[in-house]
Amino acid sequence: KIIEINKENMTVTVEAGARVSHVLDALRPHGLTLPNLASIAEQQIGGFVSVGAHGTGAAIPPCDEFVEALKIVTPSEHGVVKMTEESHGPMFKLARLGLGGLGILSEVTLKVIPAHRLVEQTIVLTRSEAKEQLPTLLKRHKHVRYMWIPYEDAVVVVSNDPENDLPLMGPGTEVDDGNGGKKKIVTVEDLEPKYSKDEKLAPLREFLRKLLKSKGTPIDEETISGMGFGDLRDFILASGNMLDPDHIKRCNKVEHEFWAKAQGIEIAPSDQKLQFDCGGQQWVYEVCFPVGTYGIPNSNSMDFVEELLKEIESSGIAAPSPIEQRWSSAST
């Protein structure tokens, strides 16, 4: 449960079993939110902080950095221990990422920030463009993630920036700021999509129809029309041999076509944009490694993906899209 929302100290104290979504719901009426999310909001707060869950943003640390205080139920003579950086120094920082090793996390106090809206831009770059533009994009945008599509020369780039602090080289319309300078705003025209929902989903729907027809499976148009992107992709993958590279290549091709039409700008509260549709069912394998500093990034992240894609494509591995890539600052 939610124990306390302290607007003066800009903190929220919750039981460790509270879900991130419940915390967001409790903060919303107070005009507050969490500093960052880790794609979904169904984690429990204890696990959310203990594993150092991270979202997107090269200058934003993992979620353990938001912890101001915690309570741990230990098997030691100390019993229930309340920890802060002031009371326990470096041990507190270790406990934030304790993975249950020091005891059972029972209560967590987290930093909160004012609720705000984010402007999300989705674009599709070629692989060479994504590699070339990465250093600029990481500094230009508050949040950035890449989604690489195996067997396709396409990288889906999703960026998010506060509505009232848009980069001049980012999305939106440039206007005078009233002080002799320029700023970006988002207009109704900027938000107007180039393609309708049906036009965006058309490549996926048509490919699914062909797959079902080739198998002699009845086509339920009502079901197909009611599916969103994630459900369609799941159905398409499962309607063929998921270990067949040719089937996966065709799936990735129509997904590329979908994203090409899905490019554009949207605006919504941060707690909606930072938890996003991961695209159906996934078996996730994550890798994390240093990529230099914010000021001087190295080539590790691009080298890794290039090597991975080379291995996938040269070996004919049935690798569905996406290979998702995020950047985060480190915990202290």
Image: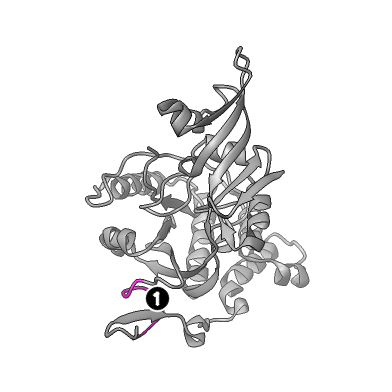
Q: In this view, does 172 lie above or below 325?
A: below
Q: Picture coordinates of residue 153 (x, y %)?
A: 37, 62
Q: Is residue 295 left or right of residue 90?
A: left
Q: How crowded is mark 1: few (under 14 residues within 10 Å), some or many (20 or more)?
A: many
Q: Does the magenta stretch include residue 168?
A: yes
Q: Mark 1 points at which residue?
A: 171
Q: Which residue lies furthest to the left in this view?
A: 296
Disc 1 is placed on an element classified as loop
**Image quarter (top left, top right, bottom left or bottom right) of the C terminus:** top left
Q: Picture coordinates of residue 207 (x, y %)?
A: 60, 67
Q: Picture coordinates of residue 19 (x, y %)?
A: 67, 45
Q: Picture coordinates of residue 237 (x, y %)?
A: 61, 55
Q: Which residue is drawn at 60% across and 27% down?
A: 72
Q: Is residue 53 magenta?
A: no
Q: Residue furthest top?
A: 77
Q: Is residue 36 above or below residue 156?
A: above
Amino acid type of the residue tagged 1 in the rendering: Pro
**Image quarter (top left, top right, bottom left or bottom right) of the N terminus:** top right
Q: In this view, does 29 lie above or below 19?
A: below
Q: In this view, does 180 lie to the left or right of 265?
A: left
User: Magenta segment range?
Assistant: 167-175
